[in-house]
Amino acid sequence: MTTTAAVRPGTPEEAAAALADLSASGTAVRPAGTGSRAAWGGPDPAGTVTLHTGGLDRLVAHNPGDFTAVVQAGVPLAVLQRRLAAEGQWLALDPPDRGGTIGGLVATGDSGPARHRYGGVRDLVIGITVVLSDGTVARSGGTVIKNVAGYDLGKLFAGSYGTLGLIAQVALRLHPLPARTATAVGATDDPARLTAAVLAAARRPLEATALDVAWRAGTGRLLVRFGGVTAPERAAAAAPLLAGAGLAGVAVVRDDESIWAAQRAGQRGAAVVKVSALPTDLPAVVAAAGDATVVSRAALGVSWLAFPDGPDLAARVATARAALAPRPTVVLDGADRVADPWPAPAPGVRALMERVKRRFDPTGTFRPGTYVGGI
Amino acid sequence: MGKIDGTRLVERLRAVVGDRWLLLDPHELRTYESDGLLQYRVVPKIAVLPADGAQVHACVRACAEAGVPWVARGAGSGLSGGALPIEDGVLIVLSRLNRILEVDLDNGRVCVEPGVTNAAVSAAVAPHLFYPPDPSSQVACTIGGNVAENSGGAHCFKYGFTTNYVTGLEVALPDGEVITIGGKELDTPGYDLLGAFVGSEGTLGVATKVWLRVVPVPEATRTLVAFFDSTRQAGEAVSAIVRAGIVPGAIEMMDATTIRATEEMAHAGYPVGRGAALLVELDGAEAECDAQFAQVTAICAEQGSDDVRVSRDESERQLFWKTRKAAFPAMGRISPNYFVQDGVVPRTTLPDVLVRIDELAAEYGLVVANVFHAGDGNLHPLVCFDATVPGQAERAEELAGRILDACLAAGGSITGEHGVGVDKRKHMAKMFAEDDLATFQRLRCAFDPEGRANPGKVMPTPRLCGEVPGVYRQHPLEAAGLAERF
């Protein structure tokens, strides 16, 4: 039995020493940043020691000319973005809230509207340093954008929910901050018409920075955001496309930050179900939502259903997930209020994931039993 | 032949693919002795050309049960020896798996078999959509090979690599089990096995079905070529363009030697004798493209180019690209032999690294021509030599290795798009520490504990997985009389 409820290493090497001790004593460990996504993945077993990443707080390097940065796990996303903005750059990830820490962001693969244009966490991590349960410190990738040497552990650890090892440090690809933004909006209460508008927009070479649907209280809105020096003109040029698809109230919003803040906020709630589907599935997603609001990265087919709190929360979530099946769903916020936040993977895939887990974490130290398929 | 015909594995493979598609004759097998990197040659004992995914799965299962290693091969256009056969193994040739299984324009997805060529994917979704990763070999190279190598191309600075476009794979694992990782949709919950598999160079299994994302063809394309006195000047122009927040669709550089060689072949009217040519292509929304193109033109002039040529039409644009893509073949006109190197440096270090390469070339008394994807710092130095001069090939190879050392010293990588294969195994330990390599091996062991899929590639030294006892076991092909020793 360990008497320590938490450890707070200041360097990857300190983390390695602590983890070697903890795994040797059979203690379960959960890495944690600011706790902004604390419920995700569900509860950890009793006796789990928290490994706080707050001490891993160095912005190791920012190379503005190369559009890259090397950052330790405990750096808050908001702090990083402020530092990068001073050079007209950003990490093109805009998850809800303040985004927690870089480590938590990579571990959960959380994202926001910019996913449409820039890809997700997996697409922006170009190198990673991890600490395994036996104290091994290992690195994959590098600090250059283009690199195919060795296996891509950055992708393996992105979205691994802290179950393979500690993400200690990442190298990131950065992007220029857009000079201006503007959003074309249009509305309809007909999910089929909304979907047709999404497909029409997705098929055009708009180079939008975001393409979202917001559905609440029986009405849907299509939101197409543009970035760059000509953003307002391009939003104006896209407006007829939305009107032509039968959307009402088509407008161009130049001061558009509040629209997108609302989209990000719509990815949080008492219980949030993320569904992996296709763009053409949007009517089915809306139909399954019940009283939940829907935020959809519509051209990607990824949606978030946010359920209002209430005594029957778990039942409403279960009904929606059943209606969405066989499309995979994950419960994010409220994961601790449902029986299993994960979908059941195919047996062969589950077996392979378990082999990956056993190889990286043979002592079962990192968040045992909390991941997909009970891994 | 009697011995071979008598082996159980051969008979099983014959039953799977049929007599016509089972190759045992060394003369026929010689077709497959190399991939695009001709200095490595190994003739496999057995090659099979299965007709579809089910036959591939059956071949992998047969190999698993016989305990025989195998290598998957697509078009064989790879440049790192990644599809080099193993002598005592089976070569699984995927060229007959060339069907496009589904085209879903609404959802921007295409599902293909691995033997479909890269160019065929874009053709299947033309004219409104396209598949962005575009290796120079795109007419010949196959999606299966692209998946294995995480192929890039000239446009990946803006559009990304194969790994950013694969959403799902049907994979035969080395133990013969067939699974689907990822899917037609994005974000399948669980470990990103897809991200681990793409770029694993055939060492984790073989993909038999590939779901790809396709995207709209850009509204507008603007292309220019600017000539500079030196690669340093051109390199500064690249930095200035990117620093201005512009993300060109492609930004390619050629040095004086390459300009001379390509001009002889492509006749584009390029000024032979100039120090560097920079090809910049912007694509995207027309208004944004035009605004940025004016900026790029101004930056090139500010950085010292007195000769900026803007393509007036599609045929001139094609000529610019033909000249760029002629770089490798054109080198054959000025040098009897050459090695193509593939290194990466942080873009801001390009000017210094180019100087270092010049110094190294002088030290070795050899010509090094430079052509590269400048936006992402991906260098392709062409080390010229004459194989008939004793010792020169060896010195050229040593020089190519020294260039990689210079890339690593600058904070770069030993390969940007060609892969490690067999060719760069020896350099892996310069880029990665032993703990890094051992951690890579953990992934390998999760997929392939017996080490049967493309053994001898990627990792610098052979490694075993934990469960495999470290004692000698007779190789099944040896037992079958196919191999005397290995």
Image (spheres, grey):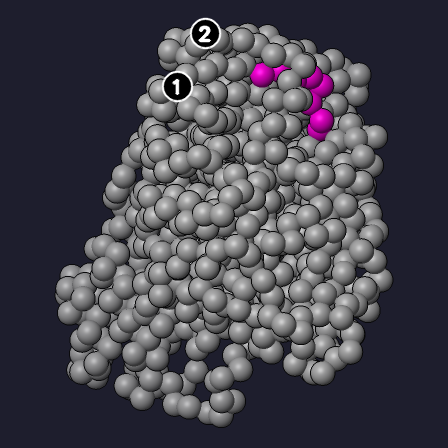
Residue B337 badge: none
**Point 48% across, 8% down: residue:** A249
- The magenta-colored residue range is A176-183
Residue type beneath disc 2: Pro
Q: Quadrant of the C terminus of chain B?
A: bottom left
Q: Is residue B246 left or right of residue B236?
A: left
Say if the magenta span includes residue B267.
Answer: no
Secondary structure found at label 2: helix
Which mark is in front, 2 or 1?
Answer: 1
Q: Quadrant of the N terminus of chain B?
A: bottom left
**Point 62% across, 15% down: residue:** A182
x and y percent of residue B35 in the render?
Answer: 43, 56
Q: Is residue B117 left or right of residue A305?
A: left
Camera-side residue of B284 and A77? A77
Camera-side residue of B31 and A187? A187
Residue type beneath disc 1: Asp
**Point 31% across, 74% down: residue:** B63
Residue A189 badge: 1
- In space, the residues marked 2 and 1 are separated at their CA atoms by 19 Å
x and y percent of residue B184 in the render?
Answer: 37, 44
Determine which quarter of the picture holds residue B44. bottom left
Residue B436 in view here: no
Residue under numbered circle 2:
A240
Determine which quarter of the picture holds residue B141. top left
Secondary structure found at label 1: loop
Q: Chain of mark 2?
A: A
Q: Is residue B328 above or below residue B90?
A: above
Q: Is residue B428 left or right of residue B446?
A: right
